[in-house]
Amino acid sequence: MPTYDYICEANGRTVEVMHAMSVTLKTWGQVCEEAELDLGHTPADAPVSKGLGLGVVAPSDSGPEPGGPCGPSCACHPH
């Protein structure tokens, strides 16, 4: 499942969230719910914008195949 960075305009925080490609989060409340974060002092309806995240797709099995399409710096390789 891909990951996305969401930037809250009200508090300046960037939060990485993993969700389906068909999902679009528009508010701080939605981001906090997906990321299981506390809203803090920021209103739930504060707008967020999607930033330039890595968009990493986590493998559905135990890991990538050796010599697979992703390189050693890919998030699916343990460091």
Image (spheres, rainbow, N blue to C red):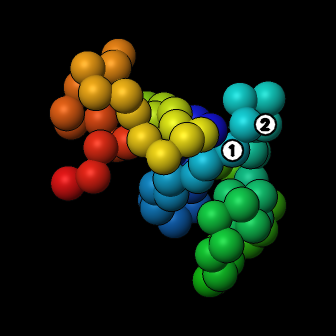
Which residue is located at x 78 percent, y 37 percent? 23
In the depicted view, which residue is nearer to us: 26 or 71?
71
In the depicted view, which residue is nearer to us: 35 or 73?
73
**Mark 2 in CB contact with mark 1 (< 8 angstroms):** yes
Q: Is residue 75 left or right of residue 34?
A: left
Hey, which quadrant is residue 10 in on the image? bottom right
Q: Which mark is residue 23?
A: 2
Callout 2 amino acid: Val
Q: Position of residue 12 (x, y in %)?
A: 46, 59
Quarter of the N terminus within the rendering: top right
Inspect this view and state whether residue 32 appears: yes
In the image, is residue 59 above or below residue 37? above
Q: Circle 2 — which element?
A: loop
Q: Position of residue 38 (x, y in %)?
A: 65, 81
Q: Distance from label 2 to label 1 (Cα)? A: 7 Å
Q: Label 2 crowding class (10 Å Cα cut-off): few <14, some 14-19, many 20+?
A: few
Q: Position of residue 72 (x, y in %)?
A: 19, 33
- Look at mark 1 in the image and give the residue it sits on: 19
Which residue is located at x 46 percent, y 61 percent? 13
Q: Is residue 20 left or right of residue 4?
A: right
In the image, is residue 5 above or below residue 8? above
In the image, is residue 70 above or below residue 46? above
Hey, which quadrant is residue 54 in on the image? top left
